[in-house]
Image: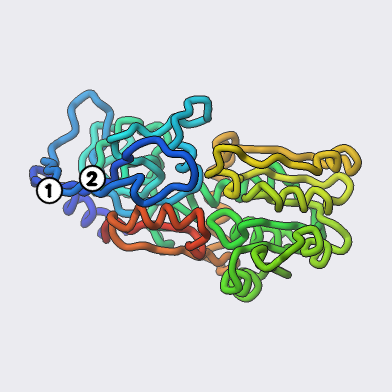
């Protein structure tokens, strides 16, 4: 491992002083409705001299290797400042979670050659000055791209949401929507490892087959083929649902509410069915929270960052032991970013959507 780290550092130092063409994905302007590829543009031809980071800045110069496509980024395309994260700036580079290699550092926590994960720009090279939540990745045999998925924000969202919000018990009935996505696939597998009965919903026959055959779900269904979601849930959960891990909101949440068992828990993780609507639909069956004494809670993974080291240790071990399978949908090249991101909202991706910007 030391030899590899030395090679990474030498390659990083070698790039300094060179002038490169820094491809970028630019956010064009605020949107209503579902994101389109034309809401972003690829900027080519901007030259960047890879110089040492200014002294006293505490910043890093990095080469981006992998970028993450996540539904929460849609919220940053609105001109709305009342959220937990500010909107993108029109005309500026889009940003998101990524895995990067440090080329130069004015920060004692990082050195050239280090591989890090955290917020970065959708571009080939970035200067990062907000370094508080960057994390150094220790070299091992787990794919680096997993650090924007299984071992990154989506994986931690699944872990914190399932264990801290859902508080599972052995033998409980668990339903996961968008179950083949970046978060849902891990929730289902953690639930199975915990001794629960697990059913997932997804948007194609191929995804349903993957849930049952590759990820070990007890059952799965294609919501697009169900005329009545309430009946679909009653078919899979004749005795009701103890835990619903909700990634979609809308009519699926409404149907799940009717099928909850007494003292059930609903973790509200995402609302991808409503995320692109300027007039989101309401929920009709909230009376079930009273009659069934159901707890429904929204959450952000950032609320639980004190648990991140434990999560990393637990899930890394499960991955290395072959007890967890993680599916990625890998797009090659920064230029594929807009189509990869837009595809999230039509269910085009199978598994965690990642863009490979460069081979390290």
What number is the disc on residue 201?
none
Say above or below: 334 vs 123.
below
> Do residues under tags 1 and 2 come within 8 Å of each other at their CB atoms?
yes
Earlier residue among tags 1 and 2: 1
Q: Which residue is located at x 13 percent, y 41 percent? A: 48
Task: Tell whether 294 sits left or right of 91.
Answer: right
* Quarter residue 330 falls in: bottom left
Q: Which residue is located at x 78 percent, y 45 percent? A: 265
Q: Please state the horizontal and vertical placement of residue 188, each as a whole percent of the image.
A: 66, 60
Say above or below: 15 vs 236.
above
Q: Which residue is located at x 39 percent, y 39 percent? A: 134
Q: Please state the horizontal and vertical placement of residue 67, each as a whole percent of the image.
A: 37, 51
Task: Tell whether 54 sits left or right of 277.
Answer: left
Residue pointed to by mark 1: 20
Of residue 202 and residue 306, the one placed in the foreground of this image is 202
Secondary structure at badge 1 equals strand
Is residue 103 visible in the rendered image? The answer is yes
Q: Which residue is located at x 83 percent, y 54 percent? A: 259
Task: Tell whether 145 sits left or right of 123.
Answer: right
Of residue 318 and residue 325, the one placed in the foreground of this image is 325
Secondary structure at badge 2 equals strand
Q: Please state the horizontal and vertical placement of residue 172, each as a whole percent of the image.
A: 81, 57
Tell me the distance, in whole angstroms, between the alpha carbons under discs 1 and 2: 9 Å
Is residue 113 visible in the rendered image? The answer is no
Residue pointed to by mark 2: 125
How many numbered circles are shown? 2
Say above or below: 68 vs 210.
above
Say above or below: 99 vs 60.
below
Packing grade of label 1 (10 A; few <14, some 14-19, many >=20) is some
Of residue 135 and residue 340, the one placed in the foreground of this image is 340
């Amino acid at each position: 491992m030391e030899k590899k780290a030395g090679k990474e550092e030498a390659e990083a130092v070698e790039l300094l002083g060179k002038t490169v063409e820094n491809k970028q994905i630019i956010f064009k302007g605020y949107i209503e409705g579902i994101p389109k590829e034309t809401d972003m543009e690829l900027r080519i031809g901007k030259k960047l001299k890879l110089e040492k980071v200014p002294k006293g800045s505490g910043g890093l110069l990095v080469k981006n290797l992998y970028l993450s496509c996540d539904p929460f980024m849609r919220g940053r395309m609105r001109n709305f400042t009342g959220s937990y994260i500010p909107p993108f700036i029109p005309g500026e580079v889009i940003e998101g979670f990524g895995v990067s290699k440090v080329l130069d550092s004015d920060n004692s926590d990082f050195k050239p050659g280090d591989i890090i994960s955290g917020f970065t720009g959708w571009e080939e090279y970035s200067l990062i000055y907000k370094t508080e939540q960057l994390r150094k990745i220790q070299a091992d045999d787990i794919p680096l791209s997993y650090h924007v998925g299984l071992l990154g924000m989506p994986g931690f969202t699944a872990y914190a949401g399932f264990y801290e919000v859902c508080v599972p018990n052995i033998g409980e009935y668990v339903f996961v929507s968008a179950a083949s996505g970046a978060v849902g696939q891990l929730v289902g597998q953690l639930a199975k490892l915990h001794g629960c009965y697990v059913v997932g919903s997804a948007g194609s026959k191929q995804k349903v087959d993957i849930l049952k055959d590759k990820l070990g779900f007890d059952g799965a269904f294609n919501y697009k083929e169900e005329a009545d979601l309430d009946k679909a849930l009653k078919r899979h959960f004749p005795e009701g649902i103890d835990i619903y891990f909700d990634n979609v909101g809308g009519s699926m949440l409404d149907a799940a509410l009717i099928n909850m068992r007494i003292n059930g828990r609903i973790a509200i993780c995402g609302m991808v069915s409503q995320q692109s609507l300027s007039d989101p639909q309401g929920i009709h069956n909230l009376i079930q929270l009273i009659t069934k004494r159901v707890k429904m809670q929204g959450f952000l993974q950032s609320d639980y960052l004190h648990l991140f080291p434990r999560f990393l240790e637990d899930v890394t071990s499960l991955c290395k032991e072959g007890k967890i399978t993680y599916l990625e949908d890998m797009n090659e090249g920064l230029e594929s970013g807009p189509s990869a991101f837009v595809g999230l909202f039509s269910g085009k991706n199978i598994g965690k959507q990642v863009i490979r910007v460069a081979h390290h």
